[in-house]
Image (cartoon, helix red, strand yellow):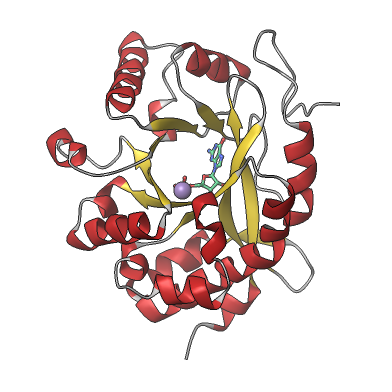
């Protein structure tokens, strides 16, 4: 029997913002648990608990993809310019069960609008590599999540066929005050450029960080500075309005375009 809490999972969407234009380039799907009183809480604990339960993880991913189908696909049809990024563990993606799930949900024609996120650690396992191959053969882009936390050898990493590199928020913490942190960040941007990968900085919380990241050549940012994850009903307005600060002047927190 699958965990009854999975039925209470809802998909929320955190915008990923183009640092040069302020437009929303995509959304990361984050799962939230809906309580009886209508409030939501992070599903992080549930996810951790399910780590060793492939069937429950499968049910969870199916639930999130079902939400995307209902909530995002209608917006895909109206707006050709954004993507949706979803965390799917290799234990689910690498086993060949995702393709049938995607077709049973009628998602095949939208696969070019999907990104699957794998953590650096997951990407380097055997199952991780089969996930990357499976995603590629479906036409889904692949992002490496939490980059910089996996302690992996770069040589292993360089052999992977990836589209997007998500720079972990732990690497951002010191970029403003610590010269070697800033150099490290620039080095990662150079690595991504050499590998023809786009970059997303995660956990951006201040205007100063966002300004630095843009100057360093990072493509996109994600974090509380712009917005937390929001319910699906707000997706279209965010796409329409984007975020006003082109980063050329200090802006207030989470300022949306008028
Ligand atoms: O590892 P992954 O990138 O999938 O994690 C996303 C998590 O990061 C979510 O739980 C989300 O709520 C959290 N998050 C998103 N933006 C920020 C931020 O600006 N600061 C911090 N501390 N956490 C963030
Ligand atoms: Mn992620």
Classify the position of the C terminus by image quarter.
top right
In the shown orientation, is residue 62 left or right of residue 141?
right
At x 56% / y 14%, what residue is drawn?
211
Number of dots carrying numbers:
0
Residue 139, given in percent of the width and then of the height, sits at 41, 54
On screen, 76 above or below 224? below
At x 27% / y 51%, what residue is drawn?
123
Question: For residue 136, which quarter of the picture?
Answer: bottom left
At x 31% / y 19%, what residue is drawn?
190
Residue 1, given in percent of the width and then of the height, sits at 47, 91
On screen, 119 above or below 188? below
Residue at the far bottom: name it: 1
Judge whether residue 33 can be spotted in this image: no
Q: Is residue 71 or residue 34 the one in the foreground? A: 71
In the shown orientation, is residue 197 left or right of residue 161?
right
Residue 106, given in percent of the width and then of the height, sits at 58, 72
In the shown orientation, is residue 114 left or right of residue 242?
left
Residue at the far right: name it: 258
Judge whether residue 253 can be spotted in this image: yes
At x 56% / y 66%, what residue is drawn?
107
In the shown orientation, is residue 207 left or right of residue 192?
right
Residue at the far front: name it: 109
């Amino acid at each position: 029997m699958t965990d009854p809490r999975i039925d209470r999972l809802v998909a929320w969407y955190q915008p990923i913002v183009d640092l040069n234009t302020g437009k929303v380039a995509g959304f990361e799907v984050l799962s939230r648990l809906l309580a009886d009183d209508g409030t939501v809480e992070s599903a992080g604990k549930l996810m951790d608990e399910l780590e060793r339960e492939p069937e429950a993880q499968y049910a969870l991913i199916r639930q999130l993809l079902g939400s995307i189908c209902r909530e995002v696909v209608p917006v895909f049809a109206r707006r050709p310019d954004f993507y949706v990024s979803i965390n799917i563990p290799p234990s689910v993606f690498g086993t060949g069960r995702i393709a049938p799930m995607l077709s049973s949900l009628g998602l095949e024609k939208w696969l070019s609008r999907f990104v699957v996120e794998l953590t650096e650690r997951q990407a380097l396992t055997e199952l991780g590599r089969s996930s990357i191959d499976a995603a590629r053969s479906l036409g889904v882009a692949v992002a490496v999540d939490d980059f910089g936390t996996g302690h992996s050898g770069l040589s292993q990493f360089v052999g992977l066929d990836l589209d997007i590199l998500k720079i972990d928020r732990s690497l951002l913490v010191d970029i403003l005050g610590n010269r070697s942190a800033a150099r490290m960040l620039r080095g990662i941007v150079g690595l991504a450029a050499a590998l023809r990968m786009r970059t997303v900085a995660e956990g951006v919380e201040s205007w100063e960080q966002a300004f630095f990241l843009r100057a360093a050549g990072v493509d996109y940012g994600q974090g509380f500075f712009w917005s937390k994850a929001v319910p699906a009903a707000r997706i279209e307005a965010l796409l329409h309005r984007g975020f006003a600060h082109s980063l050329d002047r200090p802006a207030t927190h989470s300022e949306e375009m008028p």
